[in-house]
Amino acid sequence: MLSGDEHADEEIRAFNTRTGHDYVALDFAEYDSSRAVVDYAWEAARPARPRIAHVTGRGSLDEAAYRMVRAHIATLRRTPDGAPSRAPSVRLVTGRLTRHPTSLTEQAGSA
């Protein structure tokens, strides 16, 4: 990996800026030996995990994950184009009839 390069810190800073990681020279000099170098390289090549603002604990993280899942599900539940509109509820129809009885016709009143 790195050994004695005086420009390493600048390169690592540039790498971190491009990828969003927060590596230091020691990460490259002595990577975790429980992983293969290839796995470490794949991790470094991927974008950093996003950090969510104002998430301070497990409860906040659960809430953030819950909101993200709900938002995704809402996109799946959209009504397809050309779908008929939903029929008005019984409560809505009853409310309209009782508030505006003069708008009924003889035929509608006898039904």
Image (cartoon, rainbow, N blue to C red):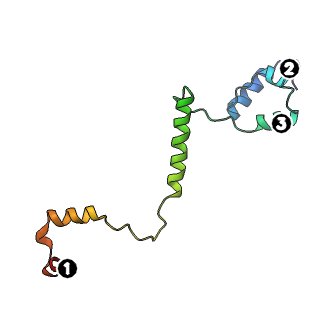
Instruction: Please name the amino acid that badge 2 sits on.
Output: Asp
Label 2, residues with CA under 10 Å away: few <14, some 14-19, many ≥20: few
For the residues bearing labels 2 and 1, Cβ distance under 8 angstroms: no
Q: Looking at the rendered structure, which numbered label has been put on residue 52?
A: none
Please name the residue that numbered disc 1 is placed on.
Answer: 111
The residues bearing labels 1 and 3 have C-alpha atoms spaced at a distance of 75 Å
For the residues bearing labels 3 and 2, Cβ distance under 8 angstroms: no
Instruction: Please name the amino acid that badge 3 sits on.
Output: Asp
Q: Is residue 61 left or right of residue 93?
A: right
| Foreground disc of the pair 3, 2 | 3
Which residue is situated farthest in the front direction here? 111
Label 3, residues with CA under 10 Å away: few <14, some 14-19, many ≥20: few
Residue visible at 74% across and 30% down in the picture: 15
Q: Please tell me whether mark 1 sits on a helix, a strand or a loop.
A: loop
Q: Looking at the rendered structure, which numbered label has been put on residue 5?
A: 2
Label 1, residues with CA under 10 Å away: few <14, some 14-19, many ≥20: few
| Foreground disc of the pair 2, 1 | 1
The residues bearing labels 2 and 1 have C-alpha atoms spaced at a distance of 91 Å
Q: Is 22 drawn above or below residue 92 in the view shown?
A: above
Placement of the N terminus among the 4 image quadrants? top right
Q: Looking at the rendered structure, which numbered label has been put on residue 39?
A: 3
Placement of the C terminus among the 4 image quadrants? bottom left
Which residue is situated farthest in the left direction here? 102
The residues bearing labels 3 and 2 have C-alpha atoms spaced at a distance of 23 Å
Q: Mark 1 or mark 3, which has the lower sequence index?
A: 3
Give residue 71's position: percent from left, percent from top. 51, 48
Q: How many marks are shown on the rendered structure?
A: 3
